[in-house]
Image (spheres, coloured by chain):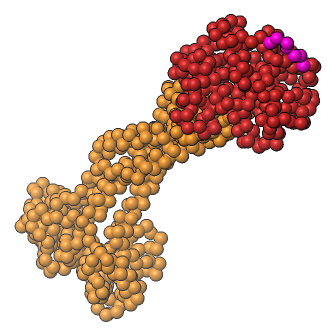
């Protein structure tokens, strides 16, 4: 069923947590495909299983049952080390709270995922500069996160997510901590990346953010409620709003 | 993740908490410094004491008989059991250069220039006694002659009288029965510093003939002979000390007069200068080990400091650990990162400790007026210990960090 053109495939994925001696079903039998180059949004109220879905797709967690296939590899069949390796190479995370390393410069933050993949220092340096240039932060390369604005931090995080040229960009409420103008600028970055051929999955509870995607997957109580196709997604260009 | 990379990140982390890192390093530094200071002090003390004891050694041994369980050494109980025949027999043994018998002559007092002083014993021996005695420097005159009414005083003894005794003076020896024997002072010995302090006991030395009157019948020859409690046996050279010692003890335990004259429970001993040095060394080693042990405690406390700081650091950086894992850090990358940081603290502490320790050792030896003997290998050991302390103290916190679940860590506030 998994297609070579799919970045991620979920087949009947369930996740049950043990809360004390009480099993809690966070996700119950979700199936979906993220074809390469697609732009998907996941929406749902809190407790709908958004975070669990994100952790599974991001190879941070393994399903209780069902299959999660990332870049053709069944995540559950991998050892912890192999899973970490797959995550480092094929998943680029963008978090709501940016999650940059506070003591590293912007360029060092962008280079960090490459450090764990054994990329040489010279190559890391070069690629980090290129990526920062791509998100419009070339001149801020040697600044620490605390010297950057929220929007700039998120752009550094996006550049970091792209470091190992992953199969999937996974963004969790990427505009949640930003004002609306900055949020729009960030979303235009994602639109640019989508146009450049990247596969994007955005988890959000804000409808306007979700409308940037080709389709919206609605989750409710751990189940896939419906898939909504957006006929005319919002596709701002980076530079439209800065 | 290569070592260079983790070192770079660790240095950043350490510099991010300057005061905390400084205090942690200080803890280890004090521990290492204390160890180095005390070990150096011990080594210097040992070198000083042994240097005096073993200074100008002769290949000699002190032969005596005493209770089997008595502590060896010059102060143990002993009996006069060695006859003149034994002296001659030992003299004839292979490798023996000289045998110098000595014993005490009980007296009531000494009289000089109309002044009589109570004094209880003279040391009787042969002229050769002065050849093999360490630190027996004549400040005036020379040794007595056998068979002559002559004596030698050390300077503290010469100073006992109101009028200082000098070579050529006649001193009267008052025997226990009140009779007086006049003797000519032929030599004065320079006061030698005892290695254990400045005190020097007044001593008066006389020839065995005519002064030494302790006699017994020699069981082997059947004649009345002088018997001595101590024989100083001198080997021809240092290489033969061991063999001579064996030979002397074999003779004594065989057909010697001494074997028959000594109580059954007594044993013969031949204590070489080496034995004395060994005893002192082991005594000082015990002392050094004790003091160093106390210093090691402070090193342990220092390492607990590292462990504590690293645990706090891991907790503080839970979120950073989560980020690193999310972007592809393996457990061993995280382990390495924290281990390198802990080790760095330990090594920097040890290096600072070496500097502090050397300063402390220099100050302490100067204060105690000891020659500085720095045990260089301890500097190397200190760095190794710092490394080890860092690794051991960092192992648990680093392992804690490595097994952190990235999902929990990213949610951590």
For image coordinates 92% across by 23% down, the residue present is A223
Chain A drawn colour: red
Question: In the picture, residue B256 is in which quadrant?
Answer: bottom left
Residue A183 location (% of width, % of height): 70, 10
For image coordinates 65% across by 32% down, the residue present is A164
Q: Is residue B381 above or below residue B243?
A: above
- Chain given the colour orange: B
Question: In the picture, residue B59 is in which quadrant?
Answer: bottom left
Q: Quadrant of the C terminus of chain B?
A: top right
In this view of the protein, which residue sits in the foreground, A145 or A10? A10
User: From this viewpoint, which residue is outermost toward the left?
Assistant: B168
In this view of the protein, which residue sits in the foreground, B154 or A38? A38
In this view of the protein, which residue sits in the foreground, A28 or B247? A28
For image coordinates 8% across by 65% down, the residue present is B167
Q: Is residue A242 left or right of residue A168?
A: left
Q: Is residue B90 left or right of residue B282?
A: left
Q: Is residue B317 inside the magenta stretch?
A: no
Residue A144 location (% of width, % of height): 55, 20
Q: Is residue B4 left or right of residue A28?
A: left
Range of residues picked out in magenta: A227-233
Q: Is residue B313 above or below residue B71?
A: above
Q: Quadrant of the N terminus of chain B?
A: top right
Q: Is residue A232 inside the magenta stretch?
A: yes
In this view of the protein, which residue sits in the foreground, B199 or B212? B199
Q: Is residue A101 visible?
A: no
Q: Is residue A18 left or right of residue B198?
A: right
Residue A232 location (% of width, % of height): 82, 11
Residue B131 location (% of width, % of height): 19, 73
Q: Is residue A42 visible?
A: yes
How many tags in the picture? 0
Question: In the picture, residue B245 is in which quadrant?
Answer: bottom left
For image coordinates 81% across by 36% down, the residue present is A4
């Amino acid at each position: 069923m998994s297609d070579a053109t799919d970045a991620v495939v979920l087949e009947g994925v369930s996740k049950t947590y043990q809360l004390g001696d009480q099993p809690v079903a966070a996700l119950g039998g979700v199936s979906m495909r993220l074809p390469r180059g697609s732009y998907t949004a996941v929406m749902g109220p809190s407790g709908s299983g958004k975070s669990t879905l994100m952790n599974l797709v991001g190879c941070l967690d393994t399903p209780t049952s069902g299959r999660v296939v990332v870049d053709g590899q069944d995540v559950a069949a991998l050892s912890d080390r192999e899973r970490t390796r797959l995550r480092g190479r094929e998943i680029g995370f963008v978090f709501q709270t940016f999650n940059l390393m506070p003591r590293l410069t912007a360029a060092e933050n962008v280079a960090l995922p490459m450090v764990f993949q054994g990329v040489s220092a010279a190559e890391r340096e070069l690629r980090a500069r290129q990526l920062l240039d791509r998100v419009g932060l070339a001149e801020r390369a040697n600044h620490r996160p605390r010297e950057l604005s929220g929007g700039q931090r998120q752009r550094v995080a996006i550049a970091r997510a792209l470091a190992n040229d992953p199969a999937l960009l996974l963004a969790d409420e990427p505009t949640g901590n930003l004002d609306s103008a900055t949020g729009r600028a960030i979303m235009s970055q994602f639109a640019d990346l989508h146009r450049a051929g990247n596969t994007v999955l955005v988890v959000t509870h804000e409808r306007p953010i979700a409308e940037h995607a080709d389709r919206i997957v609605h989750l409710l109580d751990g189940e896939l409620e419906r898939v909504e196709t957006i006929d005319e997604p919002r596709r701002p260009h980076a530079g439209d709003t800065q | 993740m290569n070592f260079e990379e983790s070192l770079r990140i660790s240095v950043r982390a350490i510099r991010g908490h300057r005061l905390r890192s400084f205090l942690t390093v200080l803890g280890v530094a004090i521990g290492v410094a204390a160890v180095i200071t005390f070990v150096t002090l011990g080594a210097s003390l040992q070198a000083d004491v042994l240097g005096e004891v073993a200074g100008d050694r002769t290949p000699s041994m002190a032969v005596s008989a005493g209770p089997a369980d008595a502590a060896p050494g010059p102060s143990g109980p002993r009996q006069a059991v060695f006859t003149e025949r034994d002296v001659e027999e030992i003299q004839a043994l292979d490798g023996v250069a000289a045998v110098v018998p000595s014993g005490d002559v009980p007296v009531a007092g000494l009289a000089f220039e109309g002044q009589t002083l109570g004094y209880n014993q003279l040391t009787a021996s042969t002229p050769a006694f002065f050849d093999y005695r360490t630190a027996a420097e004549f400040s005036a005159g020379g040794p007595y002659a056998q068979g002559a009414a002559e004596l030698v005083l050390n300077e503290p003894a010469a100073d006992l009288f109101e009028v200082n005794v000098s070579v050529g003076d006649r001193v009267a020896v008052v025997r226990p029965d009140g009779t007086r024997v006049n003797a000519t002072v032929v030599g004065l010995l320079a006061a030698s510093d005892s290695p254990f302090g400045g005190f020097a006991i007044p001593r008066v030395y006389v020839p065995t003939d005519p002064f030494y009157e302790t006699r017994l019948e020699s069981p082997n020859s059947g004649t009345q002979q002088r018997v001595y409690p101590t024989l100083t046996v001198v080997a021809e050279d240092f290489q033969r000390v061991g063999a001579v010692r064996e030979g002397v003890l074999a003779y004594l335990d065989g057909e010697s007069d001494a074997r028959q004259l000594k109580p059954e429970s007594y044993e013969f001993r031949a204590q070489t200068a080496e034995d004395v040095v060994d005893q002192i060394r082991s005594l000082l080693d015990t002392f050094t080990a004790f003091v160093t042990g106390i210093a090691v405690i402070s090193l342990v406390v220092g390492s607990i400091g590292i462990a504590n700081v690293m645990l706090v650091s891991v907790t503080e950086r839970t979120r950073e650990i989560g980020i690193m894992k999310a972007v592809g850090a393996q457990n061993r990358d995280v382990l390495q990162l924290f281990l390198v940081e802990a080790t760095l603290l330990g090594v920097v502490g040890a290096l600072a400790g070496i500097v502090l320790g050397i300063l402390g050792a220099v100050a302490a030896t100067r204060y105690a007026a000891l020659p500085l003997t720095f045990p260089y290998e301890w500097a190397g050991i200190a760095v190794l210990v710092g490394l080890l302390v860092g690794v051991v103290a960092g192992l648990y916190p680093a392992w804690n960090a490595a097994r952190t679940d990235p999902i929990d860590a990213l949610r951590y506030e």
